[in-house]
Image: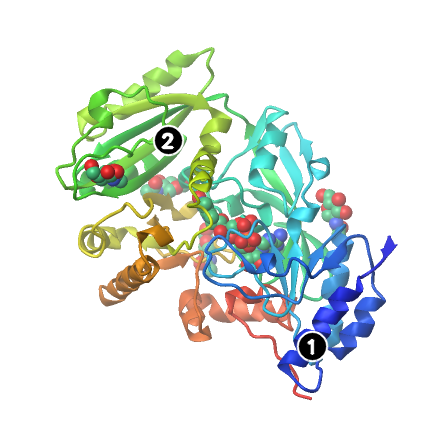
Amino acid sequence: MKASPIPQLLMALLLASINSRKSDPDAPITASFRSMAIDGQFTTHDVSNAAMDFGNRYHFLPSAVLHPGSVADIAATVRHVFQLGPSSRLTIAARGHAHSLQGQAQAPGGIVVRMESLGRAKNMHVHAGESPYVEAPGGELWIDVLKETLRHGLAPTSWTDYLHLTIGGTLSNAGISGQAFRQGPQISNVHQLEVITGKGEVINCSSTKNVELFHSVLGGLGQFGIITRARIALEPAPKMVRWIRVLYSDFTSFTEDQEKLISAEKTFDYIEGFVIINRTGILNNWRSSFNPQDPVQASHFNSEGKTLFCLEMTKNFDPEYPEIMMQEVEELLSQLRYIPSTLFQSEVSFLEFLDRVHVSEVMLRSKGLWEIPHPWLNLLVPRTGIHAFANEVFGKILTDSSNGPILLYPLNKSKWDNRTSAIIPNEEVFYLVAFLSSAPCSSGQDSLAKALKQQERILEFCKKANIQMKQYLPHYTTQEEWKFHFGPRWEEFKHKKQAYDPLAILAPGHRIFQKAVASL
Ligand SMILES: Cc1cc2nc3c(=O)[nH]c(=O)nc-3n(C[C@H](O)[C@H](O)[C@H](O)COP(=O)(O)OP(=O)(O)OC[C@H]3O[C@@H](n4cnc5c(N)ncnc54)[C@H](O)[C@@H]3O)c2cc1C
Ligand SMILES: *[C@@H]1O[C@H](CO)[C@@H](O)[C@H](O)[C@H]1NC(C)=O
Ligand SMILES: *[C@@H]1O[C@H](CO)[C@@H](O)[C@H](O)[C@H]1NC(C)=O
Ligand SMILES: *[C@@H]1O[C@H](CO)[C@@H](O)[C@H](O)[C@H]1NC(C)=O
Ligand SMILES: *[C@@H]1O[C@H](CO)[C@@H](O)[C@H](O)[C@H]1NC(C)=O
């Protein structure tokens, strides 16, 4: 333990409060933080960095950044703020990899905790055996979890499309990808969590111990506690992946085939899909992430201006016995109704497949197209509404998909634990529809405004057509909207907030609850 914190923090906190008010509500902090001994450090030079995220649209400056040296550092900080009570305005945001879209990992005027400081490979423990699992810090990136577990021939069971996200960040939402139809989201594949509540208590919880806290935190948008460790289910890691894409021009055949595949006993290991809207015709990048060994007719397929739907799936296999896989794939493909000339297949390692989006990241970064505004919208649309939705949105509201991918694939509700905080539509099958737009300056000043306007129209349409969708990675600005989002579960959510973070210190960036500050 080394004596800390540094004086800049105190200065910053003082300045912040002097700037906002004449009588300094956070004056007691000066004294209380000075007496704190922590392993890591508080900094202020990087507050502008802590006000950035992937969305690149919201920038709220914190007063200080905590680089924790231990779980105890975070607990002590939360406890401190808790003990200051309503006389202090300070809030605390855990920051994973800051791949939030609208400031969810930011803390205006508060303290941002860099969770990645705790995420180091030496802190990961893989337990092989009957039901294998890995214990990892909450700030660990999934790519590092994968690399570590692969050394033991094991891997987590449920994923996100992109792995440069942290455990705590995705478990606070759900963690959805093409495995979720069968494995459930990532929050269905966790055995235990170590959590720091809004009172600064460090608590282990699971489905048998501190059960309510466990389920609250999963999908809980960071509202109930900071995840410092997670015990994640593993399975034997596949070696290779057969990766397949096919095109449809008919939305009904596309979704019927998707649904057939997700409900089949023997099926693919990963099933997703995306929408291609290109009025100009030639589709030269619908399989851009593949190695260039595809048949010419597939790579230069002419859409004739129609909207197309790409079904994407994978089958895992052992390169020593490819025959079984080949046979199964053939059998499955023979039941599908895609446009025959558009079958495209590739073989990659399991790691290469899971880390596929990182390849695009590197490419986009090199062109300066990564750190730009990302007006994303993710919706969970119930099956009964998906046709009306597609009819209105693809081709009418959206006339081009060149601003970023539009993912569309079905999920099975029974793989979601209804005790978690995640909010999903009330139907057996619902679709993830993800509009993953970029708004680079190069496409004009108004490209961001245009994307936001389109999203507004999509949301308005859902309301008008009474499509009971739910936002994934939800973003709202008023408590009324949040109430509507949670629906019948709002009171329960509020009640749990009262129990675990009664002063509303944690994750203020979601703007669900406002910290009550006593007027002096
Ligand atoms: C390129 C890209 C691809 C994506 N693909 C997918 C996908 O396929 N599937 C999917 O489900 N999501 C996907 N996402 C969304 C992603 O899951 C969320 O944006 C997630 O919040 C990002 O994780 P993060 O670690 O960067 O979290 P942050 O943005 O840092 O934090 C997110 C929220 O969780 C809180 N939080 C962070 N760490 C902790 C912790 N340890 N304990 C408690 N709360 C914490 C924060 O305060 C904040 O409220 C993608 C995002 C990007 C940018
Ligand atoms: C939680 O459990 C882990 C082991 O699974 C242990 O290392 C840790 O100390 C426990 N934390 C608390 C607060 O009991
Ligand atoms: C959803 O999963 C359950 C449980 O595995 C299964 O019984 C059901 O058939 C699945 N439904 C669909 C539509 O896939
Ligand atoms: C759409 O067509 C144009 C012209 O052929 C091409 O340059 C562009 O890359 C296509 N977009 C997609 C998403 O395929
Ligand atoms: C959750 O699902 C179980 C069955 O899996 C059901 O009995 C229970 O009523 C559900 N709870 C809620 C709140 O929907």
Dividing the picture into quarters, in which one does residue 336 lie?
top left
Ligand 4 shown in quarter: top left
Please give left or right for residue 34 compared with residue 243 in the image: right
Considering depth in this image, is 455 or 441 the residue closer to the camera?
441
Residue tagged 2: 289
Measuring 64% from the left and 79% from the top, which residue is drawn there? 19
Considering depth in this image, is 233 or 473 the residue closer to the camera?
473
Measuring 71% from the left and 71% from the top, which residue is drawn there? 13
Residue 394 in the image: above or below residue 484? above
Measuring 28% from the left and 50% from the top, which residue is drawn there? 383
Residue 285 in the image: above or below residue 415? above
Kind of residue at badge 1: Ser
Residue 377 position, x and y percent, is: 37, 55
Q: Dividing the image into 4 quarters, which one contains the C terminus?
A: bottom right
Please give left or right for residue 76 compared with residue 423 in the image: right
Residue 175 position, x and y percent, is: 48, 46
CB-based contact (under 8 Å), mark 1 and mark 2: no
Kind of residue at badge 2: Ser
SS under mark 2: loop
Residue tagged 1: 88
Q: Nearer the viewer, mark 1 or mark 2?
A: 2
- Answer few, some or many: residues within 10 Å of disc 2's Cα (few below 14, many 20 plus, some between 14 and 19): few
